[in-house]
Image (cartoon, helix red, strand yellow):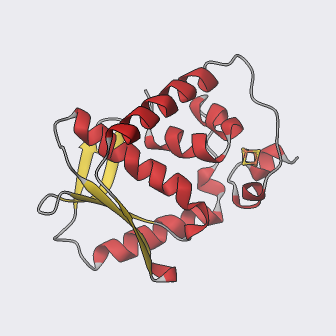
Amino acid sequence: MISASHITYYHLCHRKLWLHHRGMRMEDNSQAVAEGQLIGKTTYTRRPQRWRELDLGPLKIDHYDPHTNTVREVKKSPKLEHAHIAQVKYYLYAMEKRGIHGARGVIEYPKHRRTTEVSPLTDADRREIMGWEAEVQRIVSLPQCLPLVKKGYCRNCAFRDFCFV
Ligand code: SF4
């Protein structure tokens, strides 16, 4: 089963994707992850009535506004925006598969006073997402963990202590 984390990690680090799929969880020890979750929760409490949680089985969408058919994701920093956009696109794709068509997304970066819009999916988006899914399946099926490739993102990765012993 592919989750939103699979799609996010596919866009950040294939080694992390493989480890995550095998049940490795380091996020509880990560200050960056904790800060991101806190921002999401505290921003959410200011507008609790508009946004609902949407349970799609393997995907849980924290903020969905059924009146405007909009998914909202709150993030700490736009540094990894390409992965955030991929995550929200995957939400929209999963919603389509369950009959919720034409939804759009917004990604809010409250600390940066910035919002990124994610348009309803196009056919090109759907084809691209199917490609992501196929690649995720291929990577997680590899018999061995992918080798360590150092990158800028490693600094804030929850797996940093695991990878750089
Ligand atoms: S520390 Fe770097 S190489 Fe290791 S999982 Fe994280 S991003 Fe990937």
Q: Quadrant of residue 153?
A: bottom right
Residue 155 x %, y %:
77, 60
Residue in front for this viewpoint, 76 or 136: 136
Residue 54 x %, y %:
24, 49
Furthest-right residue in this view: 165
Residue in front for this viewpoint, 60 or 67: 67
Residue 99 x %, y %:
16, 37
In the image, 38: left or right of 57? right
Furthest-left residue in this view: 67
Q: Quadrant of the N terminus?
A: top left
Classify 50 as above or below 158: below
Classify 90 as above or below 39: above
Q: Quadrant of residue 101?
A: top left
In the image, 82: left or right of 26? left
Residue 10 x %, y %:
59, 40
Q: Residue placed at 52% from the left, 66% from the top?
A: 36
In the image, 32: left or right of 59? right
Residue in front for this viewpoint, 50 or 107: 107
In the image, 47: left or right of 143? left
Q: Residue placed at 54% from the left, 56% from the top?
A: 82
Q: How many marks?
A: 0
